[in-house]
Structure formats: C-alpha cells, structure tokens
C-alpha cells in the first residue's frame, strides 16, 4: 500500500511517497516557490532526479506537478495515481480541537483554517494545500491530518496554563500547546522498543534539537510538559529563535528598537537565537567551526544551548519524580556529539553517565550512548516524522 505524505507551507509543498510494505520511501521532493513562480525538485530512492522550473500560481498546480513527477517521465515511480491509497498531511496547529490524528472532511479543513490565528505562518497554508489536494485526488482517496500539537494535548492544566487572567485564556485560547509532537511520539516509541520496555513504564525526557528545538517530559507514555509554548518560540535557544525571554524584555526592546508587534515577532523568530548571540550563523555546525577558531560569542552560544537543555532535563526529572531515559534527536541531537557531551557532563548526581568515546562516533544512528552502569539510559534516536504520519494514516484508514 502506497501512502503520500505531505508537508505544506505557504510557498512550498514537501512530499514523500512511502510503500508501507517494508516502510520504504519510493520518492521524495519539494514543490517550491508556490505563488511566486515555481520549481520542483524530485528524487527517487534509486537516485533518479527531476529538477524543473514550473508555474505554480497556487498549491493546486504544485499537486498536479507532483502527481506528474510520480507517474510520468524518467523519475516516475508509479504508473497511475490510483496506486496511492491515501494522503497523510502534517498540520502544525490543532489547538484544543484536534487531540489525535483525524480523517479530513470539509468541516475539518475549515476548522484548520480557523486556527490560522494561532499559527499564522502554517495553518492557512495547510488548509490551502488540503483543498488543492482534494481537487487533484479523487474523492475516494482518503486524506488524513496529523497534528504537531496533538501529542501534547495530554498536558495537565497546571502545565499548559500561563499566569494570565483566566478569561483571556478562554476568550483567546492563549496557553501552551507544544510542537514537534509527531517527532517526540516517534522517538519515544522507538526508545521503548529499543529498551524492550513498555513506554508506559518509563520516565523519559525527549530532546528534539534542530533549527527549532523542543524538550518533552513523557510519563505513562504521555506528554506531561514540553518546552515550546503558545508558539514554537518558547523554550531553549534555537537557530534564529530566542527561546524563553522575560515578556518585559520584549516590550522594553520593542520600545527601544521602535518595532510594532509583528516586527517584534519577526525579530524574536528570525534574528535571535544562535544567529543573534553569535552574530555568525543559525547553524550549529558553523557555531562549532567558529569555536574551533577561538570565537568567544560562538562559545557563549554553545554554552547557553547546553545549559538550557540541562535545566530542562533537571526540571522534568523533578516533575516526574525520576528519570529512566534521555533521548537526543533532530539534526543537532542526532549529529552533534559536542552538544550531547556538554549536556550529559556532570549529570551523574541524576544517574546520567555516557560513554564519551562512543558518543563521539555516533551520527544519526540509533545508539545507546550511556555506559552500562548509568542509572539513566541515554539514546540517540533518529526521528522520522513522515513515517509516523504514514503509519497513522494507514492505521486510521484501516479502521
Ligand atoms: P529543522 O528543525 O529545520 O528540521 P534539523 O533537524 O535538520 O532542522 O537540524 C538542523 C541543525 O542540525 C543545524 O543547526 C545543523 O547545524 C545541525 N546539524 C546537522 N548535521 C550536523 C552535524 N553533522 N553535526 C552537527 N550539527 C549538525
């Protein structure tokens, strides 16, 4: 059975065609520059490629092109789109409405669109893509929505509420939602399998560290707290996002810099983080390159990241009254031994001891990096959000 996984943004449409027998990716690509001009880059698992300038006035033309790329020409992988059994869509914000993976109907698309106020960059684009996909695929191809926020809907009110008037929470839905839920769910279930335990029996801190980063406390198999908040800006320092900052510093800076609310949001999301502190790059690799060249601000950036991750591991161990495993995932978590070592050093009071030599060799492969007598197991687990979306889609359409 073939499932198409779609991750739509306002000007891009990333996709993977997955054969669920063996969970193999047959082809993946990106239709980019939608609404500007248009470009498709498409690649099959056996290395055939299509790179072409196109015309994508809307998401509909991008869907038509991806179907064409999958079914015709040198880089095709299927004969007819009827071979695709279902489409799974990644949706960023499901708020309190969508607590689990959901079959897409017109009503669901309208609700996703209505939530655009809470996720201005993403949800409207998702709704556009969902409507376009319905036009291009026949009505009997089921479509499924998988929400980044759904995994965190199990957080208790004491974790998701902010200290604001309750009526404003009710009126404007301002609360912590959390993101990266699909990734945290994927890696925590992979961890349980690797440890040979039931996820319900272990207390886990999952660190998804990439351009965007979030850390989640998982107890009884459920997210009970997470570092991102109302938006993905909150939590630890990220590539270009500040992470947590005193709200009064935001209003103070807005006045000093003469920025309105939208401009201030742009500043906090795009100009801060590694980029802002180091004044070098938003990319972890370039930060470490600069450290090796003796750059003090790059060193400070790296120190801040490791310190903030440590604080979350400590505080989440406290709220769970224990810790059995820590997961590192995402581009940084899977690849940067320096970040992992920095976080796990001087954590033996908590029962964390890693094999520093082994850790240095691990890049993107599922590996236990803690030593045998470490009370807490530490694992590097590559994430695969697309695969989880495909699995969810398959499981929902099979019901
Ligand atoms: P996104 O959040 O956009 O999905 P990724 O999960 O791909 O991002 O993570 C991107 C980050 O991972 C970048 O900061 C990059 O420097 C870092 N990264 C990727 N590969 C490596 C590597 N080999 N060593 C260190 N850092 C890496």
Image (cartoon, rainbow, N blue to C red):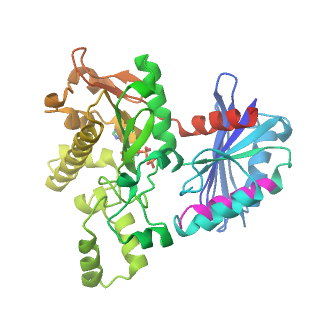
Looking at the image, residue 23 lies above or below residue 228: above
| Image point (74%, 60%), residue name | 107
Q: Main secondary structure of the magenta part?
A: helix
Judging depth in this view, the residue of 115 and 157 nearest the camera is 157
Residue 207 falls in which quadrant of the image?
Answer: top left
The region drawn magenta spans 120-134
* 383 on left or right of 224: right
The quarter of the picture where the N terminus appears is top right
Examine the rendering and report whether any part of residue 228 can be seen.
no
Q: Is residue 307 something that shows in the picture?
A: yes
x, y percentage for residue 36? 64, 68
Q: Residue visible at 54% across and 70% down? A: 117
Q: Is residue 381 above or below residue 319?
A: above
Asked if residue 1 lies in the magenta stretch, the reply is no
Q: Position of residue 330 (x, y in %)?
A: 41, 40
Q: Is residue 123 magenta?
A: yes
Q: Is residue 157 left or right of residue 316?
A: right
Q: Quadrant of ligand 1?
A: top left
Q: Nearer the viewer, residue 156 or 152?
A: 156
Q: In the image, residue 214 lies at what x, y percent?
A: 37, 47
């Amino acid at each position: 059975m073939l499932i198409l996984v779609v991750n739509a943004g306002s000007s891009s449409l990333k996709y993977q065609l997955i054969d669920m027998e063996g969970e193999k990716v047959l082809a993946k690509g990106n239709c980019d520059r939608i609404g500007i001009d248009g470009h498709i880059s498409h690649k099959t698992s056996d290395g055939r490629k299509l790179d072409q300038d196109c015309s994508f006035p809307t998401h509909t033309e991008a869907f038509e092109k991806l179907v064409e790329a999958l079914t015709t020409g040198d880089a095709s992988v299927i004969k007819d789109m009827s071979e695709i059994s279902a489409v799974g869509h990644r949706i960023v914000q499901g708020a309190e409405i969508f607590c689990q993976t959901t079959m897409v109907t017109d009503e669901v698309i309208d609700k996703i669109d209505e939530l655009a106020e809470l996720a201005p960059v993403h949800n409207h684009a998702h709704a556009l893509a969902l409507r376009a996909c319905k036009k291009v695929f026949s009505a009997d191809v089921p479509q499924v929505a998988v929400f980044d926020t759904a995994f965190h809907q199990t957080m208790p009110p004491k974790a998701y509420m902010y200290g604001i008037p309750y009526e404003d929470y009710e009126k404007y839905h301002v609360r912590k939602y959390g993101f990266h839920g699909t990734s945290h769910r994927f890696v925590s279930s992979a961890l349980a399998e690797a440890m040979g335990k039931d996820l319900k029996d272990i207390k886990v801190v999952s660190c998804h560290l990439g351009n965007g980063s979030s850390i989640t406390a998982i107890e009884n198999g459920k997210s009970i707290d997470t570092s991102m908040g109302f938006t993905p800006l909150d939590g630890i320092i990220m590539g270009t996002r500040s992470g947590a900052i005193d709200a009064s510093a935001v209003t103070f800076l807005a006045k000093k810099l003469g920025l309105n609310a939208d401009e201030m949001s742009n500043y906090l999301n795009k100009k801060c983080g590694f980029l802002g502190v180091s004044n070098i790059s938003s990319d972890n690799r370039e930060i470490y390159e600069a450290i090796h060249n003796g750059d003090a601000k790059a060193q400070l950036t790296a120190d801040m990241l490791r310190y903030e991750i440590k604080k979350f591991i400590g505080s989440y161990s406290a709220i769970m009254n224990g810790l059995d495993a820590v997961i590192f995932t995402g581009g940084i978590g899977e690849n940067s031994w320096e970040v992992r070592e920095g976080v796990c050093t001087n954590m033996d009071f908590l029962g964390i001891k890693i094999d520093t030599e082994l850790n240095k060799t691990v890049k993107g492969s599922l590996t236990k990096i803690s030593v045998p007598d470490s009370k807490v197991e530490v694992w590097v687990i590559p994430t695969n959000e697309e695969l989880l979306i495909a699995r969810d889609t398959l499981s929902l359409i099979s019901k």
